[in-house]
RNA sequence: GGGGCGGUGGCGAAAUGGCAGACGCAGCGGACUUAAAAUCCGCCGGAGUAACCUCCGUGUGGGUUCGACUCCCACCCGCCCUACCA
């Protein structure tokens, strides 16, 4: 028997798998398909332990499904456009392309060392012209559908990355850039957007997908649906001033109006006396960052415009103020303020001495209580007061009745608002897919004809952090002819958000070389949609919303006939450093998978990753802990290579080993089914322990021993694919273990023949009695009552009640 | 402020409302060894006890139940998301 040497046998089997095309995944209509996908990496340079943590359990799951009889597609690729490549170019004078593709080569090699079942012939690389041609084609299709448009607006801009960002890419309470952490600033720019808001309602519908509750909640909050009414106020001069409110029942309590500083009507309505103050306030608001503006703790600021609006429900004149707590980007950028029933309005009214009129009253309050000390905001309790003919109406009913009445009067209507914003996809960077548009002085924004796709990224550009795309300074790229009239025109020099590339990669995997469309429809008809997606929670409101939007848009394009891209989703957690902190080079707590593979072999690393914590939970790495799985594989190697010498067979021991074997087959299958990798490995360890004991005692038959070992190898093969393949071969079994069916378990063999009956008195365990399995409840009860210990507990008392839990437990209530 | 997730031995963790701590790491004792590592055997939540055993124990306090780590309510702590969205 030679020693277990993963460094030698892992590359050997990886080569054999490649040579024999073991993981080539092609259409096979005789089997049910299973499209499994794990989020693709950005080629940052090195595969880190987080990639292993995300990918190797996904691989084990895909392998398990394959053994269960599915034809499994499990592809891999690279999300290879993006800022780090360009930053490397600026810092170290390496071309982004060179940097990216060197990293891809390196990481592909590292991925192969993992021994995953990726079909590399389906590899998709988003920065390949053959890929981004179709990213550009999608852009054009979205334009055709009216789902892409260009708009001048105040957008989020990262001064470090020198580019605009989508709303989803601005994070945290200080509103920083998702990539580099710099607080963003606002800039007025003309940018391309996708109309994700067109699908807001559909995106709230999760009925067709089995996704984690957490992700659904995050997306739901992000989309932020509010139901209420649009109400048209008029200024005294007669300008219409629509507002959105979720509380039309509080209209009678509106004591002032507030407009966002950017509101277009501000200039028009401001009186000459107030003009200076308003102009100063607007200028100050403009200079302020979003952090200042959106800090909820900050005291409310604002300025009176001198103008008044007419409340359509009672014709009262109320002052119009400008304040930055009202945001231009939501609703109409103007609100009616009801200080009695809105915390923000209450704070503002208090600050500026504006009147507070109560129009909703709960049962616990009366006039004797004096003025309100805080806003009363309940939507479910209370009834309307001081509200004309609606006085006395309960709140919930009031909302409906007032809305209907507004509609009747023609001054408002029921309305829904979403917090979701359209997706800003323009980036002022080089290393991305160019937006395929030419600006003609006569025809405006003209899409590049299909025949001219892809719009190639030129290689010879200057990398300077100017805040504008380097493409703008590339004369050859910039100048083009209008596709319609041929007049000298200029190309769009912004590139697309890389989330655009990753919104459709699951389709490109199907046929990465296909050139008649984004994917081969034949492949699509078989494999789509993705059955099981896995990845980190951090993409809940970015990638996972974008890709859902994209699939819905692709449905409009007639490319797919389903509504959701990924039917099931499972999120893994995050591996932390040994110090329980997020891994980072500066903290020096980074775990290097290459070193671990070098030292222990990929199988041990995989097994430990799956064993050390609940997958969705994650947690700190522990270098000592890996010894557990290491010993497991050492033991497996020993039992797989050593000849078992059968001694005197003990029937009971023999049955016990077979029972354990079948119990573990059942357990591991169920655990892998629901991503419970840690308990699956633990169950395999239990089987290992039983086998070792049986070997020590030599008291089981060779057949039972062989069954146990062969089963263990099969159960372990999705987790540790190399060692199991090697031992399978050494045991004279046919290549490959990974093509074997998942072992069957037999309920009769798995069944215990005795049970430990737990006897409780008043819920406390007082005795344990060995009893034959399958004893009727009545007999169990008798057995329990006959127990000496129980008799002592009862001390002659008659039990008040006896509860028998089928075949398991008797609880005697004194 | 709002929403979500979590809190179990020294550590990572297990437990369809039914024996809390499976499985593993570390530790302790022993065997082997000149010695160490590796390996093997045993112990391993706390308190008491020579021992059999007994009592206590799943963040805290209540509740439901014959029975609660598990369900309900309130609170404390940690992490994540969100944050003047009218």
Image (cartoon, rainbow, N blue to C red):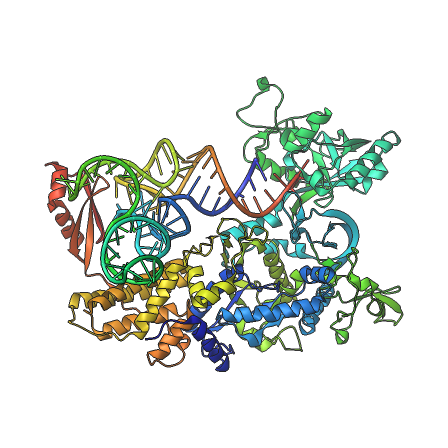
- Number of numbered tags placed on the structure image: 0
Give x and y (percent) for residue A50: 53, 59
Residue A439 horizontal/vertical position (percent)? 84, 64
**Residue A583: percent from left, percent from top:** 54, 53
Towards the viewer: B75 or A393:
B75
Image coordinates of residue A29 in percent, x first then y, are: 48, 78
Residue beneath the point at 12% across and 48% down: A782
Q: Is the residue A732 above or below the residue A231 in the image? A: below
Along the horizontal axis of the image, is A526 left or right of B42? right
Which one is nearer the viewer's eye here, A685 or A676? A685
Where does the N terminus of chain A fall, quadrant-wise? bottom left
Question: Residue, x 69% and y 57% (percent of image)?
Answer: A195
Left or right? Give the position of A713 relative to A749: right
**Residue A66 visible in the shown view:** yes
Q: Is residue B4 above or below residue A503?
A: above
Q: Quadrant of the C terminus of chain A?
A: top left
Measuring 49% from the left and 78% from the top, which residue is drawn there?
Answer: A15
Residue A147 is at least partly visible in this image: no
């Amino acid at each position: 028997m030679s020693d277990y040497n993963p460094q030698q046998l892992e590359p050997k089997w990886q080569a054999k798998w490649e040579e024999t095309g073991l993981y080539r995944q092609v259409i096979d209509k005789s089997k049910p398909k299973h499209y499994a996908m794990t989020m693709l990496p950005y080629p940052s340079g090195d595969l880190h332990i987080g990639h292993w943590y995300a990918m190797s359990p996904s691989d084990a799951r895909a392998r398990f499904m394959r053994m269960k009889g599915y034809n499994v597609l499990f592809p891999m690729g690279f999300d290879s456009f993006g800022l780090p490549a360009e930053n490397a170019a600026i810092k170290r004078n390496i071309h982004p392309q060179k940097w990216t593709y060197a990293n891809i080569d390196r990481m592909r090699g590292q991925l192969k060392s993992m021994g995953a079942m990726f079909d590399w012939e389906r590899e998709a690389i988003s920065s390949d012209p053959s890929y981004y041609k179709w990213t550009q084609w999608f852009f054009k299709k979205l334009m055709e559908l009216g789902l892409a448009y260009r708009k001048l607006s105040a957008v989020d801009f990262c001064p470090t990355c020198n580019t605009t960002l989508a709303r989803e890419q601005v994070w945290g309470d200080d509103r920083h850039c998702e990539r580099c952490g710099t607080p963003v600033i606002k800039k007025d720019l003309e940018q391309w957007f996708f109309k994700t808001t067109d699908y807001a309602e559909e995106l709230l519908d999760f009925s067709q997908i089995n996704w984690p509750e957490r992700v659904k909640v995050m997306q739901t909050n992000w989309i932020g649906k509010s139901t209420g009414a649009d109400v048209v106020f008029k200024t005294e001069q007669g300008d219409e001033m629509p507002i959105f409110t979720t509380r039309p029942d509080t209209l009678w309590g509106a004591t002032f109006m507030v407009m966002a500083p950017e509101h277009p009507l501000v200039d028009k309505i401001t009186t000459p006396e107030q003009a200076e103050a308003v102009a100063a306030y607007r200028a100050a608001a403009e200079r302020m960052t979003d952090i200042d503006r959106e800090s909820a703790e900050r005291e409310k600021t604002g300025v009176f415009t001198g103008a008044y609006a007419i409340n359509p429900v009672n014709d009262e004149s109320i002052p119009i103020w400008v304040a930055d707590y009202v945001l231009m980007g939501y609703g109409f950028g103007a609100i009616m303020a009801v200080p009695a029933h809105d915390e923000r309005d209450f704070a503002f009214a208090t600050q500026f001495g504006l009147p507070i009129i109560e129009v909703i009253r709960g049962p616990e309050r009366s006039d004797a209580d004096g003025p309100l000390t805080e806003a009363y905001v309940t939507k479910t309790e209370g009834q309307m007061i001081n509200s004309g003919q609606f006085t006395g109406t309960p709140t919930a009913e009031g909302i409906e009745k007032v809305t209907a009445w507004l509609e009747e009067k023609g001054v408002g209507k029921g309305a829904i608002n979403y917090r979701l914003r359209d997706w800003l996809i323009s980036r002022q960077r080089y290393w991305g897919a160019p937006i395929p548009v030419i600006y003609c002085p006569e025809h405006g924004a003209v899409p590049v004809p299909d025949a001219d796709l892809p719009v190639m990224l030129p290689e010879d550009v200057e990398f300077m952090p100017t805040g504008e795309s380097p493409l703008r300074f590339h004369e050859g790229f910039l100048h083009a002819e209008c596709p319609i009239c041929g007049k000298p025109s200029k190309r769009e020099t912004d590139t697309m958000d890389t989330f655009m590339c990753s919104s459709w990669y699951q389709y490109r995997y199907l046929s990465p070389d296909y050139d008649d469309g984004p994917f081969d429809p034949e492949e699509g008809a078989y494999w789509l949609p993705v059955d099981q997606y896995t990845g980190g929670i951090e993409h809940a409101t970015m990638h996972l919303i974008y890709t859902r939007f994209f699939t819905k848009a692709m449905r409009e394009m007639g490319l797919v006939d389903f509504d959701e891209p990924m039917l099931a989703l499972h999120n893994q957690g995050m591996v932390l450093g040994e110090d329980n902190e997020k891994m980072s080079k500066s903290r020096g707590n980074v775990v290097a998978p290459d070193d671990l593979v070098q030292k222990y072999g990929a199988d041990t690393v995989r097994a430990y990753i799956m064993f050390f914590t609940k997958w969705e939970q994650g947690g700190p790495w522990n270098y000592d802990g890996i010894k557990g799985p290491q010993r497991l594989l050492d033991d497996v190697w020993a039992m797989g290579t050593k000849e078992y010498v059968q001694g005197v067979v003990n029937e009971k021991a023999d049955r016990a080993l077979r029972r354990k074997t079948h119990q573990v087959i059942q357990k591991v299958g169920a655990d892998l089914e629901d991503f419970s990798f840690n308990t699956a490995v633990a169950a395999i360890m239990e089987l290992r322990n039983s086998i070792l004991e049986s070997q020590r005692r030599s008291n089981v038959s060779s057949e039972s021993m062989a069954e146990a070992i062969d089963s263990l190898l099969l159960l372990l093969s999705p987790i540790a694919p190399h060692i199991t393949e090697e031992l399978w071969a050494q045991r004279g079994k046919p290549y490959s273990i990974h093509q074997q069916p998942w072992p069957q378990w037999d309920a009769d063999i798995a069944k215990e023949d005795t049970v430990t009956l737990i006897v409780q008195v008043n819920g406390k365990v007082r005795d344990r009695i060995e009893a034959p399995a399958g004893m009727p409840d009545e007999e169990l009860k008798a057995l329990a009552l006959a127990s000496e210990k129980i008799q002592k507990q009862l001390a002659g008392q008659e039990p008040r009640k006896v509860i028998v839990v089928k075949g398991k437990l008797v609880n005697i209530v004194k």
